[in-house]
Image (cartoon, rainbow, N blue to C red):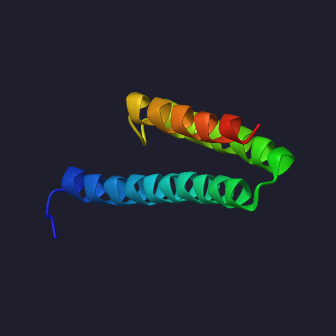
Amino acid sequence: MANIKSAKKRILVNRKKALRNKMVKSGVKTAVRKLNDQVAAGDQAAAQAALKNAVATISKAASKGVVHKKTASRKVSRMTKMVNKMA
């Protein structure tokens, strides 16, 4: 454990940020999983709704810096292609 006051604070802040990042990443994974389930079920309308939700979740994660901008773009592109193939 650190002895310096600023180092102690840094540990606490890093822990809090890591927890928040973990929650956001988990939310992204959940949104993608729900979309994949809808695509596998073949439900076009539900897949469109799940895609909208997943894109919003991923974009927010990218804007906060939790995932890289290009990673988010790649995921959105692949998901959109997957849903468009259903039509």
Residue 3, image x and y in percent? 14, 64
Residue drawn at the location 85% of the way across and 45% of the way down = 45
Residue 56, image x and y in percent? 66, 37
Residue drawn at the location 35% of the way across and 60% of the way down = 15
Q: Report the side of 26 relative to 70 (left or right).
A: right
Quadrant containing the C terminus is top right
Is residue 64 in view? no
Foreground of the two, 1 or 69: 69
Residue drawn at the location 75% of the way across and 61% of the way down = 41
**Quarter of the image where one finds residue 51:** top right
Residue farthest toward the bottom in the current orientation of the protein: 1
Above or below, 80 relative to 53: above
Residue 85, image x and y in percent? 66, 38
Q: Report the side of 52 relative to 57 (left or right).
A: right
**Quarter of the image where one finds residue 69:** top left
Foreground of the two, 8 or 77: 77
Residue drawn at the location 76% of the way across and 55% of the way down = 42
Q: How many marks?
A: 0
Residue 58, image x and y in percent? 56, 40
Is residue 46 in view? yes
